[in-house]
Amino acid sequence: MAEIGIGIVGGGYMGKAHAVAMASVGAVFDTGLRPRLEMVSAASPASAERYRTAYGFRRAASDWRALVEDPKVEAIVIASPQSTHREIAEAAFALKKPVLCEKPMGASLEDSRAMVAAAEKSGAANMVGFNYIRTPASQFARKLIAEGMIGAVTWFRGEHTEDFLADPRTPANWRTDGRANGTMGDLAPHMINAALALVGPIRALIAEIETVHMTRPGGAVGNDDQGQMMCRFAGGAIGSMHFSRIATGRKMGYAYEITGTKGAIRFDQEDQNALWLYLMDEPEAVRGFRKILTGPAHPDYLPFCQGPGHGTGYQDQIIIEARDFLSAIETGEAIWPTFRDGHAVNEIVAAAFASSETKTWQTIGAAAHR
């Protein structure tokens, strides 16, 4: 096995998650490439050094350029604000270094389009950090649908709802300023990504997006609190999605229901180790939704635990993501979701804003695919 030097830009919430994942992935999955925590960068020398010490990096830098250009940093994880994504990614790809970028990819559709072009020109491995779809339960749901277990999909309902800004007395902060930090930039991409993964391309949509709490202690709110959209999938199914950061009582409301011609599936991230499955061909007396607890028989569960029903957690999703990123680097084969897949999500978000502003249906371009 070979070592690979990892550089992480940003040491906050997601920077820590990626550092822990890279430190653990080799032991969990016995990967061919073994990450070495080479360098972390942050906005100041003090914070960079603090992250270096806390996470076990060899070195720290207060300038992301020093990290990207360092020859011992062979692959880069971008866990910094969206407004920085494009410049960092373009610099890394110019050196043909692989990049894993947190979602949403860039601060605008123009950013993500440019990032796709840079990634594909370089030929380097590239991935976007949509981690929730990687739970064993959601991977299993995707497998069941692909194998035709519930027949042709006719309907999809998805939501990503949380309540971290439900209280209007919560002061204004960085989350309440800038479109990329609003609900449609922060939460919506995860469920849109799930819809594309589970059901397929979206052909058209109509949406409403709004700010409920226009002001908060400390200032005006400059982005959206919640949104909803109806959509038509290219495969013929219809569906709807709802996104909110003011959904009182919801902590991790990443949930979906999928109806097919032979059955149905339900999932809720707040109970992430269970999948609900309904099959029409069972005897009527026992026909109903069954709760399937994830275990070693389900995708990417066994490396973490041998006991069915014991469960995996949030950090495990990031470890699975790290495994996929290392595999893409080692094999040279693209692993979903690539930057192009991340851009497809951004296209749908942009179409939703356009629909909300014009009160019309929007047709999605050919790039919005799995």
Image (cartoon, rainbow, N blue to C red):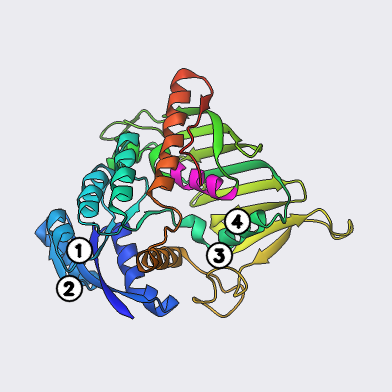
Sequence-wise first label, 2 or 1: 1
How many angstroms separate mark 3 from mark 1 (CA)? 30 Å
Q: What stretch of residues is rendered in magenta?
A: 188-198
Q: Residue at x 14, y 54 (%)?
A: 65
**Disc sitting over residue 136 in the figure:** 3
Give the image location of residue 265, x and y in percent: 68, 53
Sequence-wise first label, 2 or 3: 2
Magenta stretch: helix, strand or loop mostly: helix
Q: Nearer the viewer, mark 3 or mark 4?
A: 4
Q: Is residue 36 above or below residue 149?
A: below
Sequence-wise first label, 3 or 1: 1
* Relative to 160, 85 lies left or right: left
* Relative to 67, 348 lies left or right: right
How many angstroms separate mark 4 from mark 2 (CA)? 39 Å
How many angstroms separate mark 2 from mark 1 (CA)? 8 Å
How many angstroms separate mark 3 from mark 4 (CA)? 10 Å
Sequence-wise first label, 4 or 2: 2
At mark 3, the secondary structure is: helix
Residue tagged 2:
58
Q: Residue at x 55, y 45 (%)?
A: 195
The 10 Å Cα crowd at callout 4, few under 14, some 14 to 19, many 20 or more, is some
Give the image location of residue 46, x and y in percent: 11, 61
Q: Residue at x 32, y 54 (%)?
A: 123
Residues at discs 2 and 3 in contact (Cβ within 8 Å): no
Residue tagged 4:
142
* Relative to 293, 188 lies left or right: left
